[in-house]
Amino acid sequence: MKILDRIAADEEISQLKKELKKKTGQSLGFNYDCYTGIEDYKEHLRMCVKAGKIIVRPQDEKARNRFASVIKK
């Protein structure tokens, strides 16, 4: 089973994504550059739901900065 299939089948992730969308109006997708695996993604979702906002972690900034020159053009 591929990682995206496993994420789609995970009930806790589905519930966390719904709660986050309800609280913030935003969603948090899975990105291979930001997460070491499903548990890391799930933990980030939990943190965001608890805080009621999208939390940007240092590894998220690093991934965004890698593509900054491409995005700006």
Image (cartoon, rainbow, N blue to C red):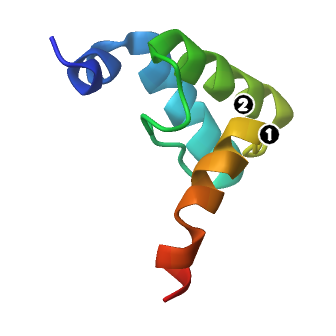
Q: Which residue is mark 2?
A: 49
Q: Label 2 sits on what residue type?
A: Val
Nearest the camera: 19 or 61? 61
Q: Do labels 1 and 2 touch, CB within 8 Å? A: yes
Q: Position of residue 46 (x, y in %)?
A: 68, 21
Q: Label 1 sits on what residue type?
A: Gly
Q: Which image quadrant for residue 8?
A: top left
Q: In the figure, is residue 24 to the left or right of 27?
A: right
Q: Position of residue 2 (x, y in %)?
A: 19, 18
Name the residue rendered at 59%, 70% in the picture.
Answer: 68
Name the residue rendered at 34%, 21% in the picture.
Answer: 7
* C-alpha gap between disc 1 and disc 2: 5 Å
Nearest the camera: 13 or 29? 29
Nearest the camera: 30 or 20? 30
- Is residue 57 at least partly visible in the picture? no
Q: In the figure, is residue 69 to the left or right of 5?
A: right
Name the residue rendered at 52%, 64% in the picture.
Answer: 67
Q: Secondary structure at mark 1?
A: loop
